[in-house]
Image (tube, grey):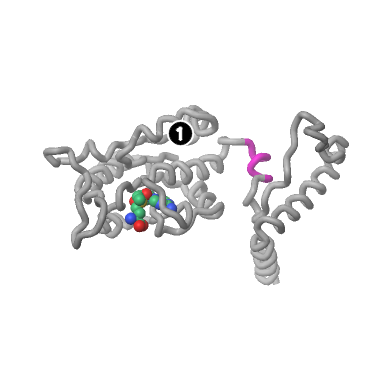
């Protein structure tokens, strides 16, 4: 899988691609990430990439011209790599969740991701390139760069080989449940001891205990996920009939 990121702030991706699981996934060639500076495509004599909005209003809008040239360049560079999808990180997009990340990770696609800045991008880019908009939550951040990193990270860790399958199976939101509480050394932290069962060495009992803890934590923090589970199971039963 390849991500081509279009941004005005390339440097914001330096740490992302050179740290931890993402760095290792790149080294293992599970994913590649190319970050392209949209400004390199401007034909404006002052190197400008943003202008005031038509109709007035505050802030600046990223112009369609350098952005479209950057997108065309990205599309061209993917021409031998099969399918691609163009995404725009946007507060009005579909809100990212596990299912969206999973879907993106299982499609045999490459992704061109547009990071907006200032007041966003010219609407005609979205129409012209049939862009899919994805939000990371119902709030506004300064630019799409952090949102893009959140999206890529959530997808990359689901790619085969990026992290161990065991970690993924029990991770929060897989199967609509949150993860059970975790403990490590020391055994006694300020009088709070690790639950005895976790030291018993009895794998079956530990697995059952963790499952029950997972359900308890989900009911406490996100009860609506339990309802979704029940609904999903009921529909599966109906389909089976
Ligand atoms: C300051 S925001 C622009 C907000 C825009 N004027 C609005 O009111 O919807 C600049 C850029 O940050 C990114 N962005 C902001 N909030 C986001 C969110 N919740 N999810 C994804 N991207 C976001 C988008 O790329 C956006 O173009």
Prevailing secondary structure class for the magenta stretch in the rendered image? helix
Give the answer, above or below, for where 161 lies relative to 228: above
Q: Is residue 67 left or right of residue 105?
A: left
In reply to whether residue 165 is colored magenta, the answer given is: yes
Q: How many marks?
A: 1
Return the x and y of residue 61 as percentages of the image width and height. 25, 52
Tell me the residue that label 1 is attached to. Answer: 16
Instruction: Please give left or right for residue 103 compared with residue 7 in the image.
Output: right
The image shows residue 178 at horizontal and vertical percentages of: 67, 51
Provide residue 31's location: percent of width, then percent of height.
46, 36
Task: Please tell me whether residue 211 belongs to the stretch shown in magenta.
Answer: no
In the displayed structure, would residue 149 be above or below residue 59? above
Q: Give the residue drawn at x 77%, y 46%.
A: 210
* Left or right of 181 on screen, residue 31: left
On screen, 239 above or below 207?
Answer: below
Question: 157 left or right of 138?
Answer: right
Of the pair 168 and 179, the residue shown nearer to us: 179
| Residue 13, quarter of the rendered image | top left
x, y percentage for residue 57? 24, 59
Residue 130 vs residue 65, the one in the foreground: 65
Q: Is residue 141 among the parts visible in the rendering?
A: yes
Crowding around mark 1 (Cα neighbors within 10 Å: few <14, some 14 to 19, many 20+) is some
The span shown in magenta is: 164-170
Which of the 4 quarters of the picture holds residue 135? Answer: bottom left
At x 40% / y 40%, what residue is drawn? Answer: 3
If the image is split into quadrants, where does the C terminus sit? bottom right
Kindly identify the residue that appears in the image at 79 percent across and 33 percent down: 190
- In the foreground, 116 or 21: 116
State the residue lying farthest toward the front: 190
């Amino acid at each position: 899988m390849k991500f081509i990121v279009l941004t005005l702030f390339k440097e914001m991706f330096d740490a992302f691609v050179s740290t931890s699981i993402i760095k290792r996934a790149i080294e293992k060639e599970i994913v590649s990430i190319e970050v392209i500076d949209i400004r390199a495509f401007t034909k404006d004599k002052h190197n400008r990439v943003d202008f005031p909005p038509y109709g007035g209003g505050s802030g600046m809008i990223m112009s369609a011209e350098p952005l479209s040239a950057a997108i065309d360049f990205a599309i061209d560079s993917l021409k031998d790599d099969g399918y691609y999808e163009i995404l725009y990180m946007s507060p009005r997009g579909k809100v990212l969740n596990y299912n969206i990340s999973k879907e993106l990770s299982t499609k045999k696609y490459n992704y061109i991701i547009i990071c907006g800045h200032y007041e966003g991008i010219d609407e005609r880019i979205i129409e012209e390139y049939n862009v899919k908009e994805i939000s990371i939550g119902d709030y506004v951040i300064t630019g799409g760069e952090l949102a893009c990193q959140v999206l890529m990270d959530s997808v990359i860790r689901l790619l085969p080989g990026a992290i161990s399958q065991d970690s993924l199976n029990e991770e929060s939101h897989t199967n609509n449940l949150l993860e059970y509480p975790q403990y490590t050394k020391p055994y006694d932290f300020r009088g709070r001891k690790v639950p005895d069962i976790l030291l018993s060495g009895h794998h079956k009992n530990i697995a059952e205990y963790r499952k029950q803890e997972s359900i308890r934590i989900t009911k406490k923090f996100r009860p609506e996920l339990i309802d979704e589970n029940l609904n999903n199971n009921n529909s599966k039963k109906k389909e089976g009939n």
